[in-house]
Image (cartoon, grey):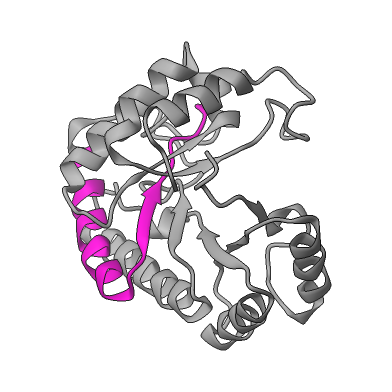
Amino acid sequence: LESSPVGFNLLAWSAPISEKMHPIAERLKKIGYDGIECFIDYQDVAAYQQFGNHLQQLGLKSTCVMVMSPDENPASESSTIREQALTRLKDAIDRAQAMGASVICGPFHSAFATFSRQEPQDAEYSRSAEVLNAAGEYAKQANIILTPEAINRFECYLCNTMAQLAELIRRADHPNVRAMFDTHHANIEEKRFPDALQTIAPVLAHVHISENDRGTPGGGHIPWDDTFRTLAEINYNG
């Protein structure tokens, strides 16, 4: 996986970005990371532009991560809420573009930690896919790839597995809407990592390397050899 840049998620220190994060960026560059992943909230676009400029001066790449609130749920029955979802995604794309980011990842296919108390409905996948398609079209002009993430059953119900995520991406049907794999969530939801990665391989564009307890990779029981071997087999280079 020599061709894959490795970044570090700034959420280990802070959700908001600011000049206070500059020394951390410099430290991560010195350690040898290729980039930094930042959380997108509602800060002014200028904050992202400023931080992005600093990363570029350091020679660091950038990606972004985000979540959706119940008021901006792409899978909602309410057309008003789905419109809010698209507005939120477009705003996030504007911020990511200002920062010079290449990817926005996260479980933005539905509202975070919000539950319907029933199994995922076919109509919910269709509604989410429609919003993601429209967001993908907006992301295209910004040269950004959207990578929705399947997360564990305690934080989401719509997309827990790579099989569910692959179906959602198929329905979204946009080249700028790809998929993400996270080893922490997969540790809870998948039977075998190689099978899960082979399932999502055709649309995989982003990976989170995270231990089963969210600690230092290598300190827990995530099957790293299986993970990296399979990523190499599917020619992953994101």
Number of on-image labels: 0
- Residue 92 location (% of width, % of height): 44, 70
Q: Is residue 119 visible?
A: no
Query: In the image, is residue 144 part of the stretch drawn in magenta?
Result: yes
Residue at image position (40%, 71%) is 93
Residue at image position (52%, 84%) is 45
- Residue 200 location (% of width, % of height): 33, 31
Q: Is residue 214 left or right of residue 208?
A: right
Q: Is residue 73 above or below residue 47?
A: above
- Residue 2 location (% of width, % of height): 55, 43
Q: Quadrant of residue 233?
A: top left
Q: Is residue 25 left or right of residue 37?
A: right
Residue at image position (69%, 56%) is 33
- Residue 41 location (% of width, % of height): 56, 68
Q: Is residue 2 visible?
A: yes
Q: Is residue 238 left or right of residue 59?
A: left
Tell which of 172 and 74 is nearer to you. 172
Residue at image position (82%, 64%) is 27
**Residue interval drawn in magenta:** 124-153
Tell which of 117 and 212 is nearer to you. 212
Outermost top residue: 191
Name the main secondary structure of what is drawn in magenta.
helix
Tell which of 40 and 118 is nearer to you. 40
Query: In the image, is residue 132 part of the stretch drawn in magenta?
Result: yes
Q: Is residue 82 above or below residue 236?
A: below
Q: Is residue 42 left or right of residue 132?
A: right
